[in-house]
């Protein structure tokens, strides 16, 4: 269980994750689908060590590459090059290894002319490109992906999708959060449907996507229409 407590004159407590029992093995590409607030991103953050469970246990065997909230660790006062170094070290990678891939990171992000400019002058697309390029610069063991294509121009997104496919194919294990059900169906060999902090269903991608649309999305749409009409 992973809970959040808000302190004020009264106490409000809710469980962001509750009753999760999950085992993922090497070779699996597991999609996590559900409405906003279902607990998908919270689960990835717990696995990556950002959050600690209040009850139960969590065991991860292997090194993790998290593609979660890319760019949030950037120091906007520092240059792109300086942020590459900081984020590289934060991801647990050896500083000496950065020399091998630094130029490739800059080139893939298409920031050759701006890499020594402070990040505060970057557009959101430039920040997104740099963060994605850093995070995907090595082949991962365990890859955690959470909606990494929310910003950036279409041309770069196409290039990023190609690299993402390569990463997924090379990783030992992948957990993939996305609202793009077509892509989930295409790249995953297992899909988990989450709802209100719990696992609702777990199975084959095509079956789980249909269940999610039928049991959650369509029912929510019907409730919204009923409320609006009432």
Image: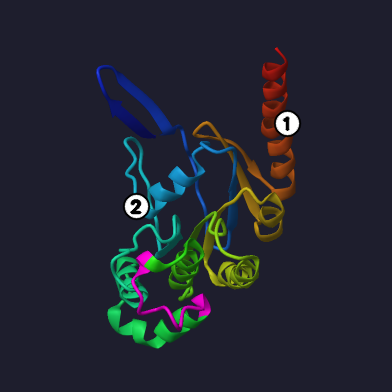
In the displayed structure, would residue 228 be above or below residue 209? above
Q: Which residue is under mark 2?
A: 49
Q: Horizontal and vertical percent for residue 70?
A: 44, 60
Q: Horizontal and vertical percent for residue 110?
A: 51, 78
**In the image, which residues are magenta?**
108-120
Tell me if residue 115 is in the magenta stretch: yes
Q: Horizontal and vertical percent for residue 23?
A: 50, 48
Q: Which residue is under mark 1?
A: 218
Q: Quadrant of the N terminus?
A: top left
Picture residue at 67% right of the left edge, 24% below the top: 224
Q: Are circles 2 and 1 on residues that touch, CB within 8 Å?
A: no
In the displayed structure, would residue 18 be above or below residue 208? above
Give the residue at the far front of this rendering: 121
Of circles 2 and 1, which is in front? 1
Badge 1 crowding class, 10 Å Cα cut-off, few under 14, some 14 to 19, many 20 or more, is: few
Tally of numbered discs: 2
* Dominant secondary structure, magenta: loop
Q: Horizontal and vertical percent for residue 202?
A: 62, 42
In the displayed structure, would residue 92 be above or below residue 114? above
Q: CA distance from mark 2 to mark 1?
A: 34 Å
Query: What secondary structure is found at the residue carrying circle 1?
Result: helix
Picture residue at 34% right of the left edge, 22% below the top: 12
Residue 217 picture quarter: top right
Picture residue at 40% right of the left edge, 83% below the top: 102
In the displayed structure, would residue 225 be above or below residue 112? above
Q: Quadrant of the C terminus?
A: top right
Name the one closer to the observer, 113 or 164.
113
Badge 2 crowding class, 10 Å Cα cut-off, few under 14, some 14 to 19, many 20 or more, is: few
On residue 202, which mark appears? none
Query: What secondary structure is found at the residue carrying circle 2?
Result: loop
């Amino acid at each position: 269980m992973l809970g959040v407590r808000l302190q004020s004159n009264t106490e409000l407590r809710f469980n962001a994750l509750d009753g999760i029992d999950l085992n993922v093995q090497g070779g699996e590409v597991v999609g996590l689908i559900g409405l906003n607030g279902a607990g998908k991103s919270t689960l990835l953050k717990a696995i990556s060590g950002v959050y600690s469970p209040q009850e139960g246990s969590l065991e991860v065997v292997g090194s993790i590459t998290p593609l979660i909230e890319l760019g949030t660790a950037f120091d906007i006062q520092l240059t792109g090059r300086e942020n590459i170094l900081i984020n590289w070290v934060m991801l647990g990678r050896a500083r000496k290894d950065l020399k091998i891939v630094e130029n490739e990171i800059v080139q893939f992000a298409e920031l050759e002319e701006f890499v020594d400019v402070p990040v505060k002058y970057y557009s959101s697309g430039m920040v997104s490109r740099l963060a994605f390029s850093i995070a995907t610069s090595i082949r991962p063991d365990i890859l955690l992906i959470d909606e990494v294509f929310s910003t950036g121009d279409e041309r770069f997104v196409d290039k990023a999708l190609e690299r993402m496919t390569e990463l997924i194919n090379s990783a030992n294990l992948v957990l993939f959060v996305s609202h793009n059900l077509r892509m989930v169906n295409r790249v995953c060999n297992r899909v988990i449907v989450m709802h209100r902090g719990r696992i609702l269903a777990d199975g084959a991608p095509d079956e789980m996507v249909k269940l999610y649309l039928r049991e959650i999305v369509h029912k929510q749409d019907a409730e919204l229409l009923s409320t609006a009409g009432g």
